Amino acid sequence: MAGQFIGKLLKNKRADESLMAWNRPNLAGPETLAVTSDAFQDGTPLPLPHAGRRIGGADLSPDLTWPQVPTGTAEILLVTEDIDAPFRQPIVHAIALIDAAVTALDPGALSGSAPGVGVRMLRSFVGRGYRGPGPIPGHGPHRYVFQVFALGAGLQPDGTPLDRLKPGAVLGTVGGPVLARGKIVGTYER
């Protein structure tokens, strides 16, 4: 009951969508990757297993597929953000570096404890590994954007290990060109 009240109070409080990874100048590039999932269609709700454990889900990342990336791709950056969180910036639910040869992720491949082959999980808003949706009840629908970037060069941290950087700092280390990118949006509401 209190959650519904808080959600309704914050109904008009949303993250600044212009601050999502997709809109960062250093992550701009051709939108030529068609990202798909068998679990949901673009713009439709994520099934309960892909939601957060605290609301009855399993924190299981959905399967994702994209076509072969362009020649010259050094690695793939995957960022999942809740762009409707009641904060200034979108909340990063997962961030990973993926081998350029990988074109599909099985369900659960973004696990912090047992990531899929070729997947390196980095630090997100709430730890390492995929955290499923769990928006405030009554806040309205939230959009979870799964963004895939084919990077022409590896990330370029300033001496701090990538595993220790917060998501915003990781995104800031992209210095080379983005050769291709694509996204798919899942929704969730309580």
Image (tube, rainbow, N blue to C red):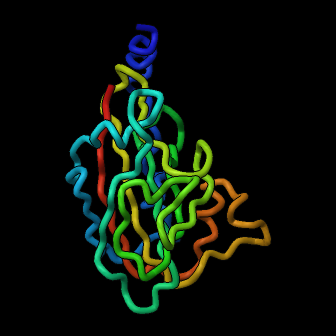
In the picture, residue 104 is in which quadrant?
bottom left
Look at the picture and state if 132 lies above or below 167: above
Look at the picture and state if 111 lies above or below 78: above
Please give the name of the residue rendered at 33% of the width and 67% of the height, measured from the top-left corner.
182
Image coordinates of residue 17 in percent, x first then y, are 42, 47
Camera-side residue of 72 and 62? 62
Look at the picture and state if 86 lies above or below 50: above
Image coordinates of residue 103 in percent, x first then y, are 35, 75
In the picture, residue 153 is in which quadrant?
bottom right
Quick one: which residue is furthest to the front in this view? 114
Image coordinates of residue 5 in percent, x first then y, are 41, 11
Relative to 91, is 104 on the left or the right?
left
Image coordinates of residue 1 in percent, x first then y, are 40, 7
Quick one: which residue is furthest to the bottom in this view? 71
Q: How many marks?
A: 0
Quick one: which residue is furthest to the top in this view? 1
Camera-side residue of 135 and 101? 101
Quadrant, the C terminus:
top left
In the picture, residue 123 is in which quadrant?
bottom right
Quick one: which residue is furthest to the right in this view? 159
Relative to 185, is 15 on the left or the right?
right
Camera-side residue of 114 and 38? 114
Please give the name of the residue rendered at 59% of the width and 45% of the height, measured from the top-left corner.
125
Please give the name of the residue rendered at 62% of the width and 75% of the height, measured from the top-left corner.
155
